[in-house]
Image (cartoon, rainbow, N blue to C red):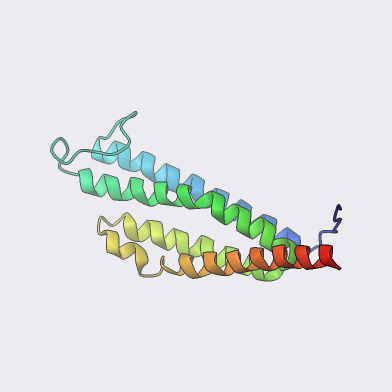
Amino acid sequence: MAVSMELTKEYGYVVLTVVAYAFLNFWMSFQVGKARRKYKVFYPTLYAIESENKDAKLFNCVQRGHQNSLEMMPLFFVTVLVGGLQHPVIAAALGVLYTLARFFYFKGYATGVPDNRLKLGGLNFLAIIGLILCTASFGINLVIREAI
């Protein structure tokens, strides 16, 4: 049986959160480009090799900060967009927290000291767990609605 639903105006906050994260991703990619020039790591090389480049760790930390954000992006987009269908304000707030935390995660990683990524950046894990719970709540609600 099909289920129909209307999007509330608050869902617009969820969409704006996704747009904000997209801008953050573009900014991170520009930072990687700047690091490529600064540390002389040219395409198509994904990661620098320490035996060939004295600044390999510094570059690799910038690259890894962006790469990790790309790896987490599908989970973030799915959970914020689906969880936001039932809980748009909560999902948008968690999405803003996640986006800000990913900024600090990247900035900390880019220092060349990987542990710095978790100082404020570690909050992204709390935000993503909250978004997973929002999404699970939406799924459970659909199942219960179907059973009635």
80 on left or right of 86? left
22 on left or right of 106? right
Q: Which residue is located at x 56 percent, y 56 percent?
A: 76
Name the image quarter holding residue 119: bottom left
Whole-percent x, y for residue 72 in the image: 49, 52
104 on left or right of 74? left
Whole-percent x, y for residue 74 in the image: 55, 49
Whole-percent x, y for residue 23 in the image: 55, 49
Whole-percent x, y for residue 61 in the image: 30, 50
Q: Which residue is located at x 70 percent, y 62 percent?
A: 139
Rendered view: 90 above or below 11:
below
**Is residue 32 visible in this depiction of the protein?**
yes
Residue sitting nearer the eye, 24 or 1 = 1
Residue sitting nearer the eye, 126 or 11 = 126
Residue sitting nearer the eye, 36 or 130 = 130
Rendered view: 19 above or below 33:
below
Residue placed furthest toward the top: 44
How many numbered badges does the structure rendering display?
Answer: 0
Q: Which residue is located at x 65 percent, y 63 percent?
A: 135
Name the image quarter holding residue 108: bottom left
**Is residue 10 visible in this depiction of the protein?**
no
- Which part of the image, by quadrant, shows the C terminus? bottom right
Residue sitting nearer the eye, 38 or 22 = 22
54 on left or right of 106? left
